[in-house]
Amino acid sequence: MGIYYQDELYGSFKIEGILEELVHTEPFQRLKRIHQGGAIIVVRPDLNQTRYEHSIGVMKLIQVLEGSLGEQIMGLLHDISHTAFSHLIDYVLDIPEENYHEQIFADVIRHPEILRVIEKYGFSIEQFLSPNKFTILDYPLPSLCADRIDYTLRDLMKLEQITKAEVKWFLKGLAIVNNRIVVTEVEYAHWFKSKYTFLVEEYFNGRDNKRANNFMAAITKELYEKGNLTLADFNEDDFHVLKKLEGILKIKLHTSYQEWLSKQDFNILFKTKPREVDPDVIIENQLFRLSQVNNNT
């Protein structure tokens, strides 16, 4: 039958077949309770975009770009293993690559509900465990990919830094060459690079994000090391961890954050992993990095 889904970036569309059944599984529904921005939700409740919305968006973008059904499935499932507050666990465990969710992906994707749906439609789990296979979904920086494009546009929409009209315009400039995403004109490359740079510098490495992550990492790391908070807790969702933290500490986290904030000198060194894009542009049927075009003008 299919379900109709309303998305902030791509509008209304139908999800059906294997994609619909995967959306209905418990592990995927759990992503509704995992916030895309992680710890910042504690101090900025308005930034409430979720991994659920992002994952469906990535799947749809791959579909729009005529990626294979297998790649659409992988787009839907690529964040299925994110733990509570997204990358918070990486700061607790001191993982600079911020890839704990990738380390546990193979185990999570073998959940009985996911396994049943995958096999029902003639796929195998092993098809989704091959690194570097799905190059529309994921491609190393500084290139574009569906994951990177969707979270950039989605986060910037929440931050009110771009409009729906700009999103619609930019999506028209995407193309697939050699099974990866490029742009068709230099203007699109300049626009995305500037927006992505803003997202990294002003949001990922911005004041609120640094403070929220320092605050939450300090609290959760101490409790984790004492055994009061476990990996099993992180494998639940944001609301489970929040409730447990407030129960153990006998505080309201937002109130505690304000008290913590007043005691800091804010010489905070916290920084997320480095990110910079340099999109490929089609010029006279050849591909050039935006930096190459800039250097030759």
Image: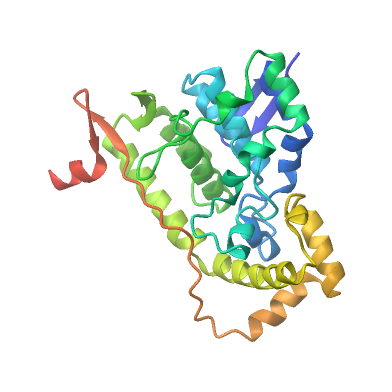
Position of 207 relative to 179 (above/below) = below
Q: Residue at x 61, y 31 (%)?
A: 76
User: Does residue 219 appear left or right of residue 202 in this picture?
Assistant: right
The one of 35 and 102 positioned closer to us in this rendering: 102
Q: Along the line of sight, which residue is nearer the eye, 181 or 89?
A: 89
* Number of numbered labels in the structure image: 0
Q: Horizontally, is 171 left or right of 74 in the view?
A: left
Residue 88, image x and y in percent?
63, 59
Does residue 22 appear anywhere in the picture? yes
Residue at point 59% right, 34% down?
57
Residue 192 appears at what percent x and percent y? 38, 44
- The colour scheme of the drawn protein is rainbow
Q: Quadrant of residue 220?
A: bottom right
**Quadrant in which the C terminus appears:** top left
Task: State the image quarter where residue 113 is shown.
Answer: top right
Q: Position of residue 162 (x, y in %)?
A: 49, 47
Residue at 77 percent across and 75 percent down: it is 255
Q: Residue 68 in the image: x percent, y percent? A: 51, 18
In terms of depth relative to the viewer, which is nearer, 68 or 9?
Answer: 68
Q: Which residue is located at x 65 percent, y 84 percent? A: 262
17 shown above or below 232: above
- In which quarter of the view is residue 25 placed? top right
Quarter of the image where the N terminus is located:
top right
Residue 40 relative to residue 25: left or right: left
Residue 24 visible? The answer is no
